[in-house]
Image (cartoon, rainbow, N blue to C red):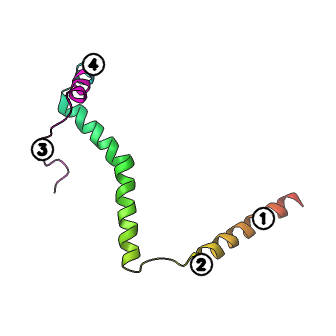
Amino acid sequence: MLHNEKTQVSLRLPAHLVAQFDQIAVLLDRDRTWVMQKALGQYLAGEGAEVLRDAQGIDELDRGESVDLEEVLEKARTIVDAAEYRRGQRVG
């Protein structure tokens, strides 16, 4: 799907939400659709992206694409040890 391709969507929303979108649209001199697109975009960039990352991680685990915890901890220990060594070299 192209980034600027449009699809018609119909929603049933509580009246108070629509009223708030309308108020914001008037204040910003924009239409309700623009305000709703911004709101949905912010959701997708935040919480929605987190949901998608979690689902992707679960899919990777289901396919056996994971890293052993001990490997990760050993790599972290190596990084910490190297940083402590460099810090000791500067102090001494």
The residue drawn where x is 23% and y is 35% is 36
The residue drawn where x is 36% and y is 47% is 45
Examine the rendered structure and indicate whether residue 56 appears above or below residue 51: below
Under mark 2, the amino acid is Glu
Under mark 1, the amino acid is Glu
Give the residue at mark 3: 9
Give the residue at mark 2: 71
Residue in the foreground of this view, choosing between 6 and 4: 6
Q: Mark 3 or mark 4, which has the lower sequence index? A: 3
Front of the two marks 1 and 4 = 4
Q: Mark 1 or mark 4, which has the lower sequence index? A: 4
Whole-percent x, y for residue 52 in the image: 34, 58
Q: Mark 1 or mark 2, which has the lower sequence index? A: 2
Callouts 3 and 4 close, C-beta under 8 Å: no
Question: Distance from label 3 to label 4 (Cα)?
Answer: 24 Å
Q: Mark 3 or mark 1, which has the lower sequence index? A: 3
| Classed neighbour count for the residue bearing mark 4: other residues with Cα under 10 Å, few (<14), some (14–19), many (≥20) | few
Question: Distance from label 1 to label 2 (Cα)?
Answer: 20 Å
Under mark 4, the amino acid is Leu
Secondary structure of the residue carrying numbered label 2: helix
Quarter of the rendering occupied by the N terminus: bottom left
Give the residue at mark 1: 84
Side (left or right) of 83 relative to 65: right
Front of the two marks 3 and 4 = 3
The region drawn magenta spans 1-23
Question: Distance from label 3 to label 1 (Cα)?
Answer: 56 Å
Give the residue at mark 4: 27
Side (left or right) of 77 relative to 25: right
